[in-house]
Image: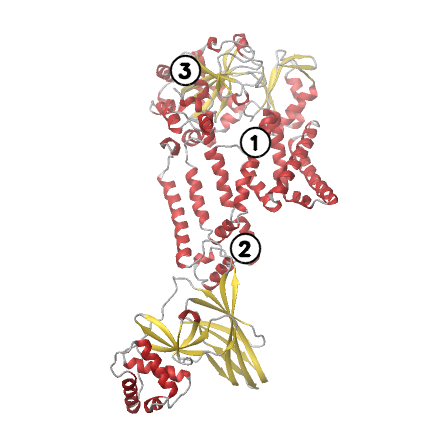
């Protein structure tokens, strides 16, 4: 019994040999070393991220407006009147996809959610008030609500996702893309793209964007559990643009180690969804590969300021 | 299974020096206290403590009286710590050259009077223990006494081959009986025991043996009202031995407490008549912690004891006694989170929970915790339907929790369950926040995750509870607070532990294949 129990635990030496990055090492050797605290707001504050991204020519969802005060809560109605194709309300300092409300369609006074639920004005107002009170923000500080145009996501991923928008997460270290995965929402994850909630993570080749391996709840899968689609058939269009977009973000936010979440808009192509200064470690499971090996390799590459984003991605595309 | 990869640390020299210094200081102070100041490492239920009641009787003669004692501040492995038990006199206590000099001054009026002075004997530490070196005494003999001395020695030990102890006993016997003319000459001046001791010292000095007379008391329980006895202290083969001229026997050194030497008076008086000093000896017991406190009071100049907190008022000491195990509990939390890798609900919630359990006991505490959490979560889920903003919502939860505690306490009382009031020990705000977080996790990640995190927090509180309620540890950490520096050093080192957490070994186990 003890043996079968131990079978679920890997010998640390083997993990080390395979270059698996641990939480303690991520925090100590990368986040603390490469991410100065004073630059955290540039990723934790979504409006600031958008502004910086815009300047550097990194496309993101179109901004409708921001609501900062409780008494302005009703103004979302006015702001979104012209957005018939839907809009998204999200906390300015949210994390992990919490507190995000996606309205697919607006029909005069009713708002239709992605899953078809119809919301009234009052319910949306409540969501905004919750955001403002800091319910979803880090540390519970008061927050603002960001309203963006809904991304009209490309139909090509439809067979691979149960509701929700599939996004590509790329870990960028010193300006070089280090590892990538696609996150697919499932019924278990309640349409959300968080791996710990049950979304499927598909590891992607940095070179080609082709799928390498897939996991759900840390266990390998070959098909999407709800749609049954073969995950090996997943193809990401504009792969080079994905990498370029992620690498460019490094030029604007001054963080050495972050995760860039990218979605594809039907019309505009790859868009930056958000940046994360503390990207999770599950990407290693999705890729069935250790991240540390790659990070150590990147540490030996030339300083990111010396190269353009194009040069950097062509460098790493040859590595992995 | 301790592969190298598990213990990867990237330790900077600065950190290594800081942690090393902290650990070194901790261990140094600890070593000094244990080996040189004799702090017991484990609580000894009953340490011995001798109490000596000194009673000075005298008759007042209407003039101003000046009475003083001359006692050693340490002797025979004890520190002496005295308090005057007599009001109505100006009391003063000087300390000089290893002596304590309590003195009383005032006008006692007429008649028989008493002054009481209580001395506690605190077992001494090795560090300050100084051995009194015996020296060869000068002999102030006249030529007649000189001749009598050599006659006596020749009579008692004609061949000069007697063992020292036999010779001493023979000399004292001869001086006591005084049937030899030489003994009569020597004992002409004083015929009591201190005279015998004095003459023996001189006789021994002629034989090249160092000796002195020692005045003191016998340490045996319940010897009430003993007058100071004079013994002979002799250095034989590098060992100081005691002989009693009264009983003509050797006395075990442990049972005698020398207070003065060479007939220096212990009691000095002026302005009174018939002064007399007597002692009562009482053996009592004392807890190890209190003994440490006494030691602390005695060697106040030692900074080690100042920082160990024994000089604080008793009330504050008991506060610190509760806090003294906190660092250890915090270390457990650090281990659980950074080495084992379990997520608790709120970083230090388990410690606070353990603190509550300390008051309630586990048997009553755990059901009480579940009860309050269940009701709180129910209340919170109702509140979430009311669409309240965060701060008012949490405030409402706090108030509901207060009322629930009151309600359950009263209910328990009515039902005759004595554990009912245990609810009040739970830290209110912490419980309210835990309810808030639990309900948020519940909403976000489902009831399973919320319950699991709560269970982990509860589980983590158990080792904390076990540690902070352990009497032995409590004594240890209160007596040796420097161990906290050591814990600090360990926590600093864990701060740079970049290896895998135990839970990660499971999480990433599929990555070990390849």
Image quadrant where residue A108 sits: top right
Q: Which mark is residue A174?
A: none
The residue marked by circle 3 belongs to what chain?
Answer: A
The residue marked by circle 2 belongs to what chain?
Answer: B
Please rate how many residues cluster around mark 1, counting C-alpha atoms within 10 Å: few if below 14, some from 14 to 19, many from 20: some
Image quadrant where residue B339 sits: top left
Please identify the quadrant where the C terminus of chain A is shown.
top left
The residue marked by circle 1 belongs to what chain?
Answer: B
- Which residue bears the numbered disc 1? B453
Position in image of residue B424 (x %, y %): 66, 44
Cβ atoms under marks 3 and 1 closer than 8 Å: no
Q: Where B107 falls versus B74 (above or below)?
A: below
Inter-mark Cα distance, 2 to 1: 36 Å
Cβ atoms under marks 2 and 1 closer than 8 Å: no
Position in image of residue B362 (x %, y %): 60, 42
Tell me the residue at 47%/33% (across/down): B340
Position in image of residue B300 (x %, y %): 46, 62
> Do dots 2 and 3 share one subunit?
no
- Which residue bears the numbered disc 2? B317
**Can residue A251 be seen in the rendering of this structure?**
no
Q: Is residue B415 left or right of residue B55?
A: right
Please rate how many residues cluster around mark 3, counting C-alpha atoms within 10 Å: few if below 14, some from 14 to 19, many from 20: many
Tell me the residue at 40%/47% (across/down): B22
Kindly state the secondary structure of the residue where label 2 is placed: helix
Kindly state the secondary structure of the residue where label 3 is placed: loop
**Tag nearer the camera, 2 or 1:** 1
Tell me the residue at 56%/26% (across/down): A94
- Which residue bears the numbered disc 3? A206
Position in image of residue B264 (x %, y %): 41, 80
Sequence-first disc among 2 and 1: 2
């Amino acid at each position: 019994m003890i043996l079968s129990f131990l079978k679920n635990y890997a010998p640390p030496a083997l993990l080390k040999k395979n270059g698996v990055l641990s939480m303690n090492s991520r925090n100590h050797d990368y986040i603390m070393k490469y991410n100065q605290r004073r630059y955290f707001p540039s990723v934790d504050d979504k409006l600031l991220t958008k502004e910086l991204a815009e300047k550097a020519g990194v496309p993101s969802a179109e901004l409708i407006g921001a609501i900062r005060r409780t008494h302005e809560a009703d103004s979302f109605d006015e702001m979104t009147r012209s957005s018939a194709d839907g809009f998204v309300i999200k906390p300015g300092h949210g994390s992990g996809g919490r507190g995000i409300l996606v309205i697919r369609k607006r029909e005069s006074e009713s708002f239709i959610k992605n899953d078809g639920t119809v919301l009234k004005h009052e319910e949306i107002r409540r969501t905004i008030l919750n955001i403002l009170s800091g319910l979803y923000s880090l540390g519970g500080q008061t927050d603002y609500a960001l309203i963006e145009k809904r991304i009209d996501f490309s139909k090509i991923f439809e067979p691979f996702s149960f509701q929700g928008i599939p996004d590509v997460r790329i870990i960028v270290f010193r300006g070089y893309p280090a590892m990538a995965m696609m996150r697919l929402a499932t019924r278990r994850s309640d349409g959300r793209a968080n791996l710990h909630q049950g979304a499927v993570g598909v590891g992607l080749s940095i070179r080609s964007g082709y799928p390498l391996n897939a996991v759900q709840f840390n266990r390998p899968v070959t098909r999407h559990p709800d749609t049954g689609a073969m995950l090996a058939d997943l193809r990401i269009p504009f792969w080079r643009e994905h990498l370029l977009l992620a690498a460019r973000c490094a030029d604007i936010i001054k963080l050495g180690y972050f995760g860039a979440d990218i979605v594809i808009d039907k019309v505009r192509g790859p868009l930056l969804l958000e940046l994360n200064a503390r990207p999770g470690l599950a990407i290693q499971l999705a890729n069935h590969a250790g991240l540390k090996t790659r990070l150590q390799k990147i540490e030996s590459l030339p300083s990111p300021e010396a190269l353009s984003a194009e040069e950097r991605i062509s460098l790493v595309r040859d590595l992995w | 299974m301790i592969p190298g990869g598990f213990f990867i640390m990237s330790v900077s020299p600065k950190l290594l020096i800081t942690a090393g210094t902290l650990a070194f200081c901790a261990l140094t102070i600890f070593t000094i206290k244990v080996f040189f100041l004799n702090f017991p490492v484990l609580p000894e239920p009953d340490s011995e403590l001798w109490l000596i009641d000194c009673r000075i009787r005298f008759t007042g003669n209407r003039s101003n009286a000046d009475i003083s004692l001359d006692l050693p501040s340490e002797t025979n492995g004890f520190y002496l710590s005295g308090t005057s038990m007599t009001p109505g006199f100006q009391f003063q206590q000087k300390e000089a050259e290893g002596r304590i000099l309590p003195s009383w001054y005032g006008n006692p009026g007429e008649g028989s009077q008493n002054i009481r002075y209580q001395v506690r004997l605190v077992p001494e530490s090795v560090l300050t223990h100084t051995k009194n070196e015996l020296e060869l005494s000068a002999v102030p003999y006249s030529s007649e006494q000189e001749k009598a001395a050599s006659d006596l020695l020749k009579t008692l030990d004609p061949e000069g081959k007697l063992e020292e102890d036999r010779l001493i006993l023979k000399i004292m016997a001869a001086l006591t009986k005084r049937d030899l003319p030489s003994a009569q000459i020597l004992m002409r001046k004083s015929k009591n025991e201190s005279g015998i001791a004095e003459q023996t010292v001189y006789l021994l000095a002629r034989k090249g043996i160092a000796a002195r007379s020692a005045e003191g008391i016998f340490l045996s329980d319940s010897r009430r009202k003993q007058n100071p006895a004079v013994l002979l202290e002799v250095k034989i083969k590098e060992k100081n031995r005691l002989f009693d001229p009264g009983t003509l026997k050797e006395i075990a050194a442990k049972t005698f407490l020398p207070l003065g030497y060479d007939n220096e008076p212990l009691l000095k008086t002026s302005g009174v008549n018939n002064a007399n000093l007597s002692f009562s000896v009482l053996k009592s017991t004392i807890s190890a912690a209190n003994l440490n406190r006494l030691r602390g009071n005695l060697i106040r100049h030692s900074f080690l004891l100042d920082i160990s907190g024994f000089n604080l008022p008793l009330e504050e000491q008991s506060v610190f006694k509760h806090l003294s195990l906190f660092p250890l509990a915090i270390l457990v939390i650090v281990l659980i989170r950074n080495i084992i890798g379990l997520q608790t609900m709120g970083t230090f919630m388990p410690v606070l929970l353990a603190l509550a359990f300390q008051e309630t006991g586990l048997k009553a505490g755990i059901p009480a915790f579940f009860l309050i959490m269940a009701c709180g979560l129910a209340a919170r889920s109702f509140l979430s339907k009311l669409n309240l903003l965060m701060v008012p919502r949490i405030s409402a939860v706090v108030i509901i929790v207060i009322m629930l505690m009151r309600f359950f306490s009263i209910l328990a009382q009515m039902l005759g369950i004595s554990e009912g009031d245990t609810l009040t020990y739970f830290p209110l705000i912490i419980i309210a926040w835990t309810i808030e977080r639990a309900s948020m996790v519940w909403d976000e990640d489902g009831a399973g995750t919320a319950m699991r995190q709560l269970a982990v927090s509860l589980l983590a509180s158990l080792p904390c509870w076990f540690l902070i309620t352990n009497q032995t540890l409590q004594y240890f950490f209160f007596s040796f607070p420097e161990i906290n520096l050591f814990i600090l050093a360990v926590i600093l080192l864990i701060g740079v532990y970049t290896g895998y957490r135990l839970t990660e070994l499971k999480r990433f186990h599929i990555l070990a294949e390849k």
